[in-house]
Image (cartoon, rainbow, N blue to C red):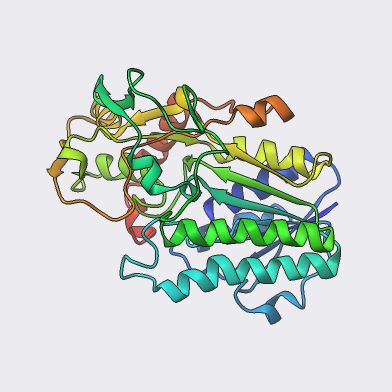
Amino acid sequence: MKVLISGVCGFTGSHLARYLIESHESITIVGLDNLARPGSETNRLPIKQLGVQLFHGDIRISSDLETLPLVDWVIDAAAQPSVLAGRDGKTSPRQLIEHNLLGTVNLLEFCRSAHAGFILLSTSRAYSISALTQLPLRAKSFAYTLDASQPWPAGVGLDGIAESFSTEAPVSLYGATKLASERLAWEYAAGFQVPVYINRCGVLAGAGQFGTAEQGIFSYWLHAHAARRPLKYIGFGGHGLQVRDALHPRDLARMVDFQLRGGGYNQAFNLSGGRANSMSLAQLTEWCDDRFGPHQPLPENSERPYDVAWLILDSSKALTETGWKPHINLCQILEEIANHAANNRDWLAQCGA
């Protein structure tokens, strides 16, 4: 089997390549990366040493795909991953759309020509911000939780947000590019018989992740806390009660491995750490205080676009239909990041955070 991974030198792409090479006796990984993000260069040599056939190219440029070898599957792990992308002053809306949507178009065209399958790594931010902000919440143990005394909208349960939850706008510019990419992928599945999987991922977290708080809050928070960088509880009263769940990329890789081995094409799954792997910023700070010593974030009451107070994905569909569930728990993820922070004290500077 031959598999192309776009964004192979990124945090997620490199984990996928490593896991698949370890899990398959006869697999060839073709990697494509433009090496534009700070930190991605650190993965280039280790990826090549694994045996990845690495190509320097940009998915926004269709001609960069013309020299790639034919493959059986394409995994789209290249993206502008920040929910604030297009509005943060670092990337323009056009840059975001060209990367996250036009790049998907080029990869889908590559799949159509090569008769290859397509796996899109999508996002929890495909779900409606308006619907998420209207969820009934209450504060408990320094974290928001669903309020059981009030009715919940469709697609919400004790385990979180299901695939049936609203995707109506607004979903952020970032979320809109991913949602549009999903729908294009379904059209290629229907029109050209391209096998497709859509994986809507929760917050990915683990050692070696590079970026900012908007791209990987767990990793960023631990590194910033350990380095005594300024931290802020932004919005929602400035108390840090907002909640997310964490997913290790090796758990994502287990599902991708299952999908590559065939069966049940053309499905979409939520993949996340779920309620058991969830934590508020205040609870995360308490964990960091115990690990690194006290370091108090400052409250900031200003609101940012696209922020939501509570977002946990329900992955029970994946469990029911494939048997998948995360194996790496939140404590293991945090310890892995903490050890990395201890051994790489200038990591955020290296990554341009």
Residue at the spot 46% in from the left edge and 35% down from the top edge: 246
Compared to 62, does 186 lie above or below? above
Compared to 269, does 94 lie above or below? below
Q: Nearer the viewer, residue 43 or 62?
A: 62
Instruction: Name the spot of residue 313 as percent of width and height, x first.
Output: 50, 34
In this rendering, position of residue 341 left or right of residue 174? left
In this rendering, position of residue 138 left or right of residue 337? left
Instruction: Name the spot of residue 52 as percent of width and height, x first.
Output: 72, 58
Instruction: Name the spot of residue 207 as percent of width and height, x first.
Output: 47, 41
Q: Nearer the viewer, residue 31 or 63?
A: 63
Observer able to see residue 133: yes
* Quadrant housing residue 82: bottom left
Residue at the spot 69% in from the left edge and 25% down from the top edge: 320
As drawn, the residue found furthest toward the bottom would be 63
Instruction: Name the spot of residue 343 as percent of width and height, x first.
Output: 39, 42
Q: How many marks?
A: 0
Which quarter of the image is occupied by the C terminus? bottom left
Residue at the spot 42% in from the left edge and 40% down from the top edge: 340
Q: Nearer the viewer, residue 206 or 303?
A: 303
* Quadrant housing residue 106: bottom right
Observer able to see residue 39: no
Compared to 210, does 145 lie above or below? above
Residue at the spot 61% in from the left edge and 54% down from the top edge: 46
